[in-house]
Amino acid sequence: MKVILDSQKLNNEVKKIKSSKGTIGFVPTMGALHQGHLSLIKQAVKDNDKAVVSIFVNPAQFGPKEDLKKYPRFLKKDFALCRKAGVDLVFVPDTKSMYPEGYSTFVEVKELADKLCGACRPGHFRGVATIVAKLLNLVEPDVLYLGQKDAQQAIIIIRMIKDLNFPVKVKIMPTVREKDGLALSSRNIYLNREQRKIAPVLSEALSFAKLLIDNGQRDAVRIISQMKRLINRKKFAKIDYVSIVDLEKLENLKKINKKCLIALAVKIGKTRLIDNAIISYA
Ligand code: AMP
């Protein structure tokens, strides 16, 4: 496994792979890797001749009051996990090389980026779309691997790929969870013991919504208010949003009469967690 810090060197490696007609699977991450990331990475290794992972805590997707500085960084452990999983190249650029002085170009995916998490985190998806576009240009992958855990992010990136004609396929991998349902996230380590006990409330609320839908409830407003009631019973839990939206435009649905996304963000203490479920309407 090669660790590459420099985009020129990365490009040389990519050229070598391309000249031997090898396929590239790519997993962009912010590091502090866990089994969720690893499910994407293992799939990329399995499907392709070469697997590339990027580790970059992207300042452009953090708001001024967010956790950029204290975001967990465990590079040595991440490298060991990547090596064990069979990764070929790990790209670890520094901030200056990705955003040198005078950097001025950003990718905005209109409409989709203002909904759900975008409403609570202005500019977040502009930062995400920009870094993913840059990484796609550098890595030139055949397949990009993304997690269902960040459903809105995946929908926005798919839109950008289509709109900007990036020649890459996208594979979405299911959310990996702890035994009690909590979706794995690099931010889970911020939770203290008491908060960790409460954190599965996001997946509990999603399961509850599915149960209501299975039992015939189709009124989205009612489902949301019951989910909120369940969450608000927990100490430390503060809801950012609970929404039921269509999968194309992420617009709120009144009635569940087509495939939809139930998405929520809840602060447990100071830690903001997200989760979602796709409901295949039957
Ligand atoms: P991040 O390091 O948080 O930027 O995540 C990098 C990639 O891993 C994104 O495509 C995420 O959606 C994906 N990911 C993060 N957590 C999980 C999880 N629990 N299950 C599956 N994929 C995940």
Image (tube, grey):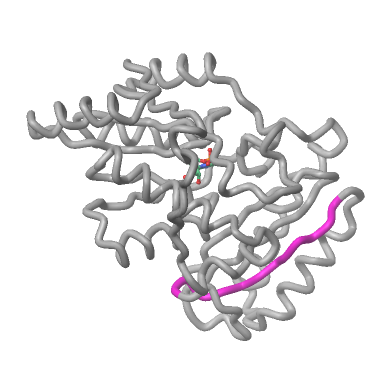
Residue that appears at 36% across and 42% down = 135
Q: Nearer the viewer, residue 203 or 122?
A: 122
Q: Nearer the viewer, residue 32 or 8?
A: 8
Residue that appears at 53% across and 28% down = 33
Residue that appears at 79% across and 51% down = 267
Instruction: Residue 154: give x, y in percent of width and height.
Output: 45, 56
Which region shows up in magenta? 237-248
**Residue 198 lies in what quarter of the image?**
top right
Along the horizontal axis of the image, is 26 left or right of 128? left
Vertical arrangement, residue 214 with respect to residue 164, above or below: below
Q: Nearer the viewer, residue 162 or 170?
A: 162
In reply to whether residue 239 is colored magenta, the answer given is: yes
Q: Nearer the viewer, residue 220 or 99?
A: 99
Vertical arrangement, residue 211 with respect to residue 15, above or below: below
- Count numbered badges in the picture: 0
Residue that appears at 49% across and 33% down = 96
Of the 4 image quadrants, the one containing the N terminus is: top left
Instruction: Residue 248: give x, y in percent of width and height.
Output: 44, 74
In reply to whether residue 196 is colored magenta, the answer given is: no
Along the horizontal axis of the image, is 130 left or right of 11? right
Most extreme residue toward the left is 20
Instruction: Residue 62: give x, y in percent of width and height.
Output: 63, 47
Instruction: Residue 91: give x, y in percent of width and height.
Output: 39, 27
Vertical arrangement, residue 202 with respect to residue 54, above or below: below
Along the horizontal axis of the image, is 104 left or right of 206? left
Most extreme residue toward the front is 102
Secondary structure predominantly adopted by residues drawn in magenta: strand
**Residue 11 lies in what quarter of the image?**
top left
